[in-house]
């Protein structure tokens, strides 16, 4: 009887020495992104070019991590602070004619680089994104899902040469890696 107890005690004592996977945040929030977006046509072309968003800011509300907090331990959770942080993005775009022959739609892809703050930490995120636009459109990254508008544009239609405009996005921030996966 003592031998099985000794084996169980030895196993229990060795469990903390086993490697454990890093826990990632599992959370969700609502974010707004505001800033300036520039569309620059490629030399000699009006149907493709590059885009960039800068200066811009992102502000999120919600839970960065429902499961734990680095400062408070498991089960407590960690909220966004709601403070605005830096947001930038850049990539390429191409335009395609609309079915009615009017404005052009823009399809783009690239990378966004942003910071979000929680009650315990500043988190730096760099991820790929895609968008589809015809003055308003969808904006998607692995963690940001939502819509954006370009309400102040130097042209009444995006079929004109690319320009500088106001960029407004309302996105859901969703991270599902970690304990539930």
Image: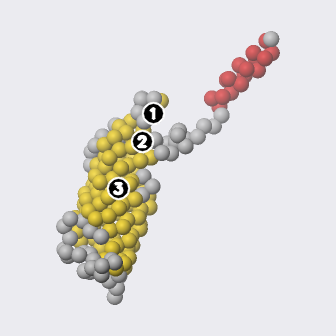
Residue 13 can be seen, yes or no:
yes
| SS under mark 1 | strand
Q: Which mark is residue 41?
A: none
Q: Residue 117: percent from the left, percent from the top?
A: 34, 44
Q: Residue 77: percent from the left, percent from the top?
A: 41, 33
In the image shown, does 35 or 143 lie closer to the viewer? 143
* Residue at 37% over, 65% down: 131
Image check: 73 left or right of 162?
Answer: right
- Which residue position holds label 3? 146
Image check: 139 left or right of 155?
Answer: right
In the image shown, does 11 or 106 lie closer to the viewer? 106
- Which residue position holds label 1? 68
| SS under mark 3 | strand
User: Residues under labels 1 and 2: Cα distance?
Assistant: 10 Å
* Nearest to viewer (mark 1 / mark 2): 2
| SS under mark 2 | strand
Image check: 132 left or right of 15?
Answer: left
* Nearest to viewer (mark 3 / mark 2): 3
Lower position in the chain sequence, tag 1 or tag 2: 2
The extreme front residue here reads 100
CA neighbours of label 2 inside 10 A, class few (<14), some (14 to 19), many (20+)? many
- Which residue position holds label 2? 27
């Amino acid at each position: 009887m003592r031998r099985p107890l000794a084996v169980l005690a030895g196993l229990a004592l060795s469990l903390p020495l086993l490697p454990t996977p890093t826990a990632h945040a599992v959370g969700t929030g609502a974010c707004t992104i505001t800033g300036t977006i520039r569309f620059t046509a490629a030399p000699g072309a009006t149907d493709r070019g590059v885009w960039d968003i800068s200066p811009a800011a992102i502000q999120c509300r919600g839970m960065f991590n429902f499961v734990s907090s680095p400062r408070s331990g498991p089960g407590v959770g960690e909220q966004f602070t709601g403070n605005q942080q830096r947001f930038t993005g850049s990539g390429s775009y191409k335009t395609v004619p609309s079915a009615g022959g009017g404005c052009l739609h823009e399809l783009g892809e690239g990378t966004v680089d942003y910071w979000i703050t929680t009650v315990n930490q500043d988190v730096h995120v760099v991820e790929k994104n895609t968008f589809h636009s015809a003055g308003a459109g969808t904006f998607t990254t692995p963690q940001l899902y939502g819509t954006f508008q370009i309400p102040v544009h130097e042209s009444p239609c995006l079929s004109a040469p690319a320009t500088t405009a106001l960029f407004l996005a309302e996105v859901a921030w969703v991270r599902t890696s970690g304990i539930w996966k």
